[in-house]
Image: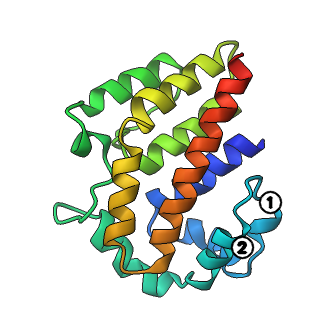
């Protein structure tokens, strides 16, 4: 797994899974102990340190639920909640690029980042085109609004900082795709 894939996978997982999810436990330990910095390819050490200081899954569970879960979510994590664009557009695109799909909703912010990681890991000859399209059409078209709302509505510093880290990371990753396509 390269840096691009790792960043997308970490951020996607943090948005997609509740903090007390057993799958997240090893990642949460890395964050809390400040060890993610050793593996993080972006210059965000101060932000990662802040993230680690506020990493308490039992406390974060309520914030995650209030922000992202159900009909009363303060910040719905679905592209279709922010744009007049159906989830089926994302599903069709992911099918076109060969990603195996389940019945789960595909336009969740975290799922889109995980899809970017998958695209990087299963790169075809035209992966830059697919990744660029994923970023431009399906992520960047609404991520600033979504991440701004996460910052404004989070009760914990963890999700406020995660939004900042994600915004900076998306910009850096998109710049990397631009450089690779030139």
Q: In this rendering, is residue 167 above or below 161?
A: above
The image quadrant of residue 48 is: bottom right
- Under circle 1, the secondary element is loop
Any mark on residue 81, and which?
none
- Quote the CA–CA distance across marks 1 and 2: 10 Å
Judge left or right: residue 33 versus residue 159.
Answer: right
Q: Can residue 149 be seen in this view?
A: yes
Position of residue 51 measured from the top left corner of the image (x, y, whole percent): 60, 75
Q: Which residue is drawn at 31% across and 63% down?
A: 68
Residue closest to the far left? 71
Q: Is residue 14 visible?
A: no
Any mark on residue 39, and which?
1
The image quadrant of residue 98 is: top right
**In the image shown, does 67 or 115 lie closer to the viewer?**
67
Judge left or right: residue 63 versus residue 58.
Answer: left
First-in-chain label (1 vs 2): 2
Position of residue 162 measured from the top left corner of the image (x, y, whole percent): 52, 65
Tell me, yes or no, whether the two marked residues, 1 and 2, touch with CB atoms within 8 Å: yes
The N terminus - image quarter: top right
Q: Residue at x 74, y 58 (%)?
A: 43
Q: Residues within 10 Å of mark 2 (few under 14, many from 20)?
A: some
Q: Residue at x 73, y 68 (%)?
A: 45
Q: Name the residue under label 2.
A: 30
Position of residue 13 measured from the top left corner of the image (x, y, whole percent): 54, 57
Position of residue 145 measured from the top left corner of the image (x, y, whole percent): 34, 50
**In the image shown, does 57 or 136 lie closer to the viewer?**
136
**In the image shown, does 45 or 116 lie closer to the viewer?**
45
């Amino acid at each position: 797994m390269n840096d691009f894939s790792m960043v997308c996978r970490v951020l996607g997982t943090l948005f997609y899974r509740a903090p007390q999810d057993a799958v997240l436990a090893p990642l949460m330990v890395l964050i809390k102990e400040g060890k993610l910095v050793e593996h993080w390819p972006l210059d965000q050490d101060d932000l990662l340190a802040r993230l680690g200081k506020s990493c308490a899954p039992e406390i974060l569970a309520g914030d995650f639920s209030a922000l992202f879960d159900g009909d009363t979510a303060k910040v719905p994590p679905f592209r279709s909640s922010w744009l007049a664009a159906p989830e089926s557009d994302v599903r069709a695109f992911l099918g076109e690029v060969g990603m195996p799909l389940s019945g789960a909703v595909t336009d969740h912010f975290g799922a889109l980042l995980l899809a970017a990681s998958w695209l990087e890991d299963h790169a075809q000859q035209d992966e830059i085109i697919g990744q660029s399209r994923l970023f431009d059409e399906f992520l960047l078209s609404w991520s600033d609004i979504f991440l701004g709302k996460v910052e404004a509505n989070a009760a914990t510093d963890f999700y406020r900082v995660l939004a900042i880290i994600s915004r900076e990371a998306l910009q850096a990753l998109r710049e990397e795709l631009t450089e690779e396509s030139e």
